[in-house]
C-alpha cells in the first residue's frame, strides 16, 4: 500500500457484520437503506473532514460493507477481525493524517454538528485525545473520539493487551501518564438515553425514530431527536449505564 499525501482530518467508521448480540446489525434496513449507509451519508455532511473511510475486517462476510462504501466513492481499509487497532494503523499509514476521528457502525444517530464542534475544540487544545465518552453526557450512540495520529503511532510501541487492540483508543485513555486527554461535555446530562444499535429492541427504536424523520434522514439534528422524544416520552429508551459499559466486550 502506497502512502498518500498527508491530510488534516481522517474520519474512520469501524464496522463489521459479525456482531454477536444482533448479527449483521449495520446492514439492518431502515427507511429502505442499510443503517450503515444512512450513517455514512450523515458523516459525509460533516464540515472539516478531509477523508472518510470504513475500516472493516478481511472476512468475506464483510465484503458487503465494502460494497456499500463503494456506492459513495468511500475508501475501505480491511484488516484483522479482532485487532481493530491494526486497521487504524493501516489507515494512518496510507493517508498520513494529522488527526483521526473514530466512530463505530453501531451509532446510527451520528450528529455532524457535534463532530464539527468537537473538531474545533481539538484544534484549539493541546491534547492527544478528545472524546465525549470519558464521562458520558451524551446518549449512548452519539460517541465520537478524536485522536492525534502521533498518539496512535506512539501507542503502537507499547505492549498492548488484547482489549486495547480490540478497542483502539483504550490504551490512550488508560495511560494518563503518557497521553493528554480531554472530555467533551454536553450542556446537560443526557447520558441515560440509549440511541445505539446492539439489540433487537435498539433496532425497533432506531426504526421508529428514522420513520418519524422520513425524508429528513440526513438533516435531523440532536435537538430534533430530543424534541421528538420529549413529545413522545413513551418512545424514549433509557439505560442505567450497565448496557453502555457492556459494550466494551464488542468491537464494532
Image (spheres, grey):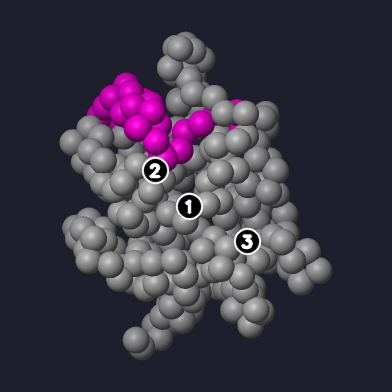
Q: Quadrant of residue 25?
A: top left
From the image, tell me which residue sits under label 3: 170
Q: Is residue 69 visible?
A: no
Quarter in which the C terminus is drawn: bottom left
Residue that sits furthest to the right in the current view: 177
Quarter in which the N terminus is drawn: bottom left
Q: Secondary structure at mark 3?
A: helix
From the image, tell me which residue sits under label 2: 21
The alpha-carbon separation of the residues under discs 3 and 2 comes to 22 Å
Indicate which disc residue 226 carries.
none
**Residue sitting at x 33%, y 38%:** 218
Indicate which disc residue 250 carries.
1
Queried whether the magenta region covers residue 175, the answer comes back as no
Residue 136 location in percent, x, y? 65, 40
Q: Mark 3 or mark 1: which comes first in sequence?
A: 3
Q: Residues within 10 Å of mark 3 (few under 14, many from 20)?
A: some
Closer to the camera in the image, 36 or 51? 36
Q: Is residue 98 left or right of residue 173?
A: left
Q: Is residue 209 visible?
A: yes
Q: Residues within 10 Å of mark 1 (few under 14, many from 20)?
A: some
Amino acid at each position: 500500500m502506497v502512502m498518500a499525501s498527508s491530510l488534516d482530518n481522517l474520519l474512520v467508521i469501524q464496522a463489521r457484520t459479525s456482531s454477536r448480540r444482533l448479527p449483521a446489525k449495520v446492514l439492518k434496513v431502515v427507511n429502505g437503506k442499510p443503517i450503515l449507509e444512512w450513517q455514512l451519508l450523515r458523516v459525509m455532511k460533516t464540515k472539516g473532514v478531509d477523508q472518510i473511510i470504513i475500516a472493516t475486517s478481511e472476512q468475506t462476510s464483510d465484503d458487503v460493507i465494502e460494497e456499500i462504501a463503494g456506492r459513495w466513492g468511500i475508501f475501505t481499509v480491511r484488516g484483522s477481525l479482532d485487532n481493530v487497532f491494526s486497521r487504524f494503523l493501516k489507515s494512518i499509514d496510507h493517508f498520513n493524517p494529522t488527526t483521526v476521528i473514530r466512530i463505530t457502525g453501531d451509532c446510527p444517530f451520528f450528529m455532524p454538528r457535534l463532530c464539527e464542534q468537537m473538531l474545533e475544540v481539538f484544534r484549539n487544545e493541546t491534547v492527544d485525545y478528545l472524546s465525549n465518552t470519558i464521562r458520558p453526557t451524551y446518549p449512548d450512540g452519539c460517541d465520537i473520539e478524536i485522536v492525534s495520529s502521533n498518539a496512535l503511532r506512539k501507542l503502537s510501541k507499547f505492549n498492548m493487551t488484547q482489549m486495547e487492540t480490540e478497542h483502539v483508543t483504550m490504551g490512550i485513555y488508560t495511560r494518563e501518564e503518557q497521553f493528554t486527554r480531554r472530555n467533551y461535555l454536553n450542556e446537560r446530562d443526557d447520558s441515560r438515553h440509549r440511541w445505539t444499535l446492539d439489540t433487537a429492541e435498539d433496532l425497533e427504536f432506531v426504526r421508529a425514530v428514522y420513520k418519524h424523520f422520513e425524508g429528513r434522514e440526513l438533516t435531523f439534528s440532536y435537538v430534533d431527536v430530543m424534541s421528538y422524544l420529549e413529545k413522545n416520552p413513551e418512545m424514549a429508551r433509557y439505560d442505567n449505564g450497565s448496557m453502555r459499559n457492556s459494550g466494551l466486550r464488542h468491537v464494532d
